[in-house]
Image: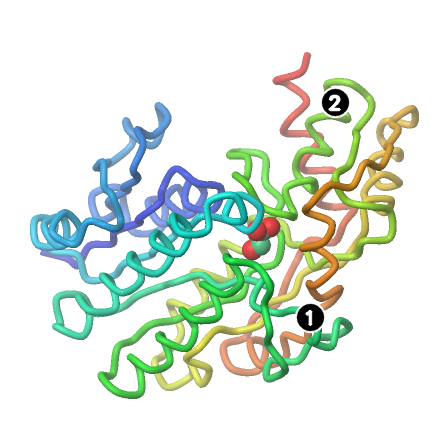
Amino acid sequence: MRSRILIIGACGQIGTELTIALRKRFGAERVIASDIRQGSGDLLSEGHFELLDATDYAAVEDIIFRYKIETVYLMAAMLSAIAERFPEKAWHLNMTSLFHILNLSKEQKIKKIFWPSSIAVFGETTPAINTPQLTVMEPSTVYGISKQTGERWCEYYFNKYGVDVRSIRYPGLISYTTEPGGGTTDYGVAIYHRALKHGHYRCFLNEGTVLPMMYMDDAIKATIQIMDAPKKAIKVRSSYNLAGVSYAPEDVTQSIQKHIPDFEISYEPDFRQAIADTWPASIDDSAARNDWGWEHSYDLDQITEVMLKNLTPQYK
Ligand code: SER
């Protein structure tokens, strides 16, 4: 039988689109979607779907044996804003799930792992403009600490046990299929929904808050590309910086106004502002570009166009 792929956290913002992309590429038979909650109609009907708690070792191992899984995409995680409310739960989910997968690979029960990191690994002391691949990293959020720790463990398992784990530091991701759940960059998606629904958006981040962002298709392309790359091309075994575009809320506003001239934004920053203030404004991703040929496609206006076009039908 051909090798199979397991996606853990398939109902999340990235997981949903990754599942669709991998099924398209490898065939629905070879891709097993799993999540702690029941998937939407398409996820369930268009291929294998399993309910799975990523922190339950026996359950994860069982699925891996049952479906003869060789590759795991571990997308389950608690994001930055929500993790501040549930620090221990976030740490437990983010770390335990990673250890399970790393250990299953160490025991040669799976061959290849994708594990996402984030711009949240950076902190206030990190250079904020063109943040280098190798730099000061003092994250101040539970989520950031879990991702930075995860990166260290990934590199450790690669060096010590030869575990083929590959990782990307995703920026804020913009998509229309599934909304993000509990991050600091969530405004970047919400703003399009509100523009169409109300013509107004009250932003929880302040004007001038420039953050690295990326359209989902670019993020999926990067994910598939890094997993396709030959093993020796992957020189960074912690996690690769990855950049698309960088912008602030007022930049998206102007971009939306090209289509909806009356659209307005107001600012009411909350606790998420303090998180955003510790994150970089732009990212140097030359290592990813040099090592495995990464290139982004979407700029802000292209993102706006595709978001408005695809969200419009649901607000008509
Ligand atoms: N988008 C994520 C968040 O805001 C960052 O990885 O938490």
- Rounded to the nearest whole Å, what is the CA distance between mark 1 and mark 2? 30 Å
- Tell me if I can see residue 72 in this picture: yes
Where in the figure is residue 29, as x and y percent of width and height? 20, 43
Badge 1: residue crowd in 10 Å (few <14, some 14–19, many ≥20):
many
Q: Which mark is residue 196?
A: 2
Query: With 203 as the anchor, is 33 left or right in this view?
Result: left
Residue at figure coordinates x 77%, y 44% from the top left: 205
Where in the figure is residue 68, as x and y percent of width and height? 11, 55
Where in the figure is residue 261, as x and y percent of width and height? 92, 27
Using the rendered view, name the quadrant where residue 153 is placed.
bottom left
Where in the figure is residue 209, as x and y percent of width and height? 81, 53
Residue at figure coordinates x 29%, y 79% from the top left: 157
Q: Amino acid at mark 2?
A: Leu
Residue at figure coordinates x 63%, y 83% from the top left: 135
Residue at numbered disc 1: 283
- Tell me if I can see residue 218 in this picture: no
Q: Relative to residue 275, is residue 177 depicted above or below?
A: above
Q: Relative to residue 71, is residue 6 depicted above or below?
A: above
Residue at figure coordinates x 61%, y 17% from the top left: 314
